[in-house]
Structure formats: C-alpha cells, structure tokens
Amino acid sequence: ITGTARPSPPNPAVGAVGLVSTVAILVSLTRKYLKIVKPSMKEGFLFGLLSGVAGIVIDTIYTAAVDATRPLGNLTDITFWVAVVIVVAIAAFVGFYESRKTKT
C-alpha cells in the first residue's frame, strides 16, 4: 500500500468556525434587509430563499472551478441541502423575531 495517501479527517474546529461565522453573517444581513422592508416571517423566509439560491450558485461555480472531477459540486451531498434548509429557517426566524420586536 505504498504510494497511496490517506486523506486526513476534517478538523471539527474549522467546521465550527465556519458554522458560527455563516450564522452571524446571515443574521446580520437578514436584519439589514428587514430594516428596508416591513419585518415579517415571510420576508425573512424570502430572504432566506434568496440566500440559499445564492449559496447554491456560488458553491457550484467555486467547486466546478476548483475540482473538475465534481462538476455538480456539493449538490449531491445531503449535508449541503440540510445547510440550505437551515439557512432558510434561520432567516425566517429572524424575520419572525424582528416582527415581534417592532410590535412592542
């Protein structure tokens, strides 16, 4: 088995930092968007959908450019789709939270 390199397992700390930064950026951008429109769960959901679609497009372009052996990028990975659903859910929750905050 000489000459074959084993890929090292992913570092969980890197994934945690990526997750926390993604959530922080998403919440910040959603709150900025909701200052432009009337805050509601629907508007947060729509912003989440837009963010999810943008993420899909960016990830597909980036992965295709970096790894030609995977032209579909992460589109076949279930964890990618779970992340997209979570992005939409977080943005919808921020919309709900901001709408409740403005009523009081």
Image (cartoon, rainbow, N blue to C red):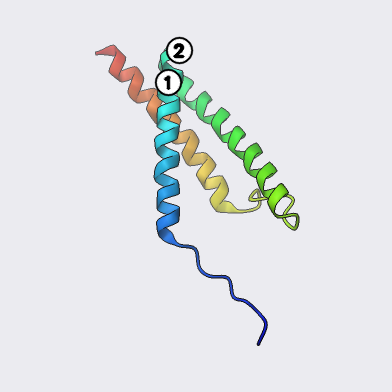
Farthest-out residue, front: 3
Taking depth in this image into account, of 13 and 56 the one nearest to the observer is: 13
Tell me which residue sits at (66%, 37%) in the image: 57
| Residue ID for mark 1 | 32
Relative to 35, say whether 59 is above or below: below
Q: Quadrant of the C terminus?
A: top left
Relative to 9, say whether 14 is above or below: above
Which numbered tag is attached to residue 36?
A: 2
Kindly check if marks 2 and 1 are in contact, taking CB atoms under 8 A apart as contact: yes
The percent position of residue 5, horizontal first and vertical second, equals 62, 76
Q: How many residues crowd around disc 1 within 10 Å: few (fewer than 14), some, or many (20 or more)? A: few
Answer with the quarter of the image where residue 60 lies.
top right
The percent position of residue 23, horizontal first and vertical second, equals 42, 38
Relative to 51, say whether 60 is above or below: below
Which numbered tag is attached to residue 61?
A: none
What secondary structure is found at the residue carrying circle 2? Answer: helix
Tell me which residue sits at (61%, 53%) in the image: 77
Tell me which residue sits at (38%, 27%) in the image: 94
Q: Amino acid at mark 1?
A: Lys
Tell me which residue sits at (72%, 48%) in the image: 65
Relative to 19, say whether 94 is above or below: above
Q: Is residue 5 left or right of residue 48?
A: right
Q: How many residues crowd around disc 2 within 10 Å: few (fewer than 14), some, or many (20 or more)? A: few
The percent position of residue 87, horizontal first and vertical second, equals 48, 37
Total number of numbered labels?
A: 2
Q: Amino acid at mark 2?
A: Ile
Determine the CA span between mark 2 and mark 1. Answer: 7 Å
Taking depth in this image into account, of 17 and 57 the one nearest to the observer is: 17
The percent position of residue 97, horizontal first and vertical second, equals 33, 25
Farthest-out residue, left: 104
